[in-house]
Image: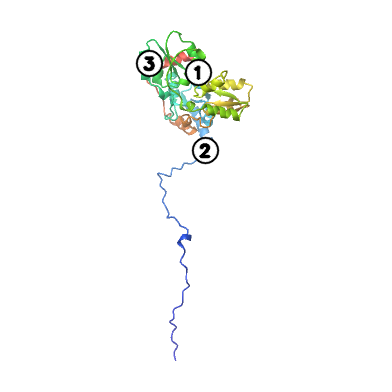
Amino acid sequence: MTDLPNTTPTPRPVTERPDPASTPVVPRPQTPNRDLLQLEVMPDESQIRADIERLRREKNAVIIAHNYQRPEVQAVADYVGDSLGLSRQAAKTDADVIVFAGVHFMAETAAILNPDKTVLLPDLRAGCSLADTVTAQGIRDWKTQNPGGLVVTYVNTTADVKAESDYCCTSGNAVQIVQNLPADVPVLFAPDRFLAAHVIRETGRAMDVWDGACHVHEAIRPEDVTDQQAAYPDAELLIHPECGCSTKILGTLPELQLYSTEGMVHRARQSAAQEFIVVTETGMVTRLEHDVPEKTFIPVSRTACCEYMKMITLENIRDALENLQPRVTVPADIREKALVPIERMLAIG
């Protein structure tokens, strides 16, 4: 008898169906969108500094930086100072190329004083909210209404506004400029109304005042000052005359002196105080810490920061030197007229 094959199917192991709620979801592979993914290699700051040094020598260039610039930009500059100091440096430099680590009106001033030199502004977007508050036509209209009047404009103005002016000034010499004007003529002071208030207090001179202000200085509140005074009761105040808080602070401290940025450096050196509350743009703390390293400087507010000043970087300074661009120039007819009030300013002090 032949055995028949076993046809009974072998039972398969039972596999439980997974619970969808407990199963991890694996996303589908995606191709990166290169338009959105804009990653850059972190720059080697030491190499950028070395490139700047090399290019500075090759191009016979000078780098001048305003007190409100980034710390690393101040560190590579040949000269760091306020608007008046920068104007003087621009007037006397023997370099072929001037790299202006500042804002547009400052580079224009350098170009007015140095028409045969190459003046570079590493980022042309670096403007000035104060300079934007006044126009050349506005000055012309005032002069039409006040024949024989004198126009004193803060150096924080465009070249075409300077061309309509009789005198330029800075926060460091505005009082001195106005004191030298004839007493019997009307004066328009433009565009900073807070600096004008300081000049009026110091000189007793009645003036027409343009209604302009720096957005950074205007935003510094009296409470910012008093809060820091409470935190640092032994600190001395260093207040810039452009600050919107100055009038109210002077109401409670009438003997308080206001200082230009260069004046702050001199005061910090001479004062017996060891701590200072710096009431201006935050970059000034860097300058003070460099020049007076044995003392302590506290910014009035971390938000008192000019985004236009901070547009200048080591990278775009290097690129400007490499390419000799972007270049700032002033038309000859504007330059010749704007030179007059600038030279009058430099002659007075």
Residue 214 on image: x %, y %: 46, 25
Q: Of callouts 3 and 1, which one flags the residue occurring earlier in the amino acid sequence? A: 3
Q: Which residue is mark 3?
A: 142
Where residue 236 sits, quadrant-wise, is top right
292 and 189: which one is in front? Answer: 189
Amino acid at dot 3: Trp
Q: How many marks?
A: 3
Amino acid at dot 2: Asp
Q: Which residue is mark 1?
A: 198
Q: CA distance from mark 3 to mark 1?
A: 22 Å
Where residue 118 sits, quadrant-wise, is top left
Q: CA distance from mark 2 to mark 3?
A: 52 Å
Q: Of callouts 2 and 3, which one flags the residue occurring earlier in the amino acid sequence? A: 2
Q: Which residue is mark 2?
A: 44
Amino acid at dot 1: His
337 and 174: which one is in front? Answer: 174
Q: Secondary structure at mark 1?
A: helix
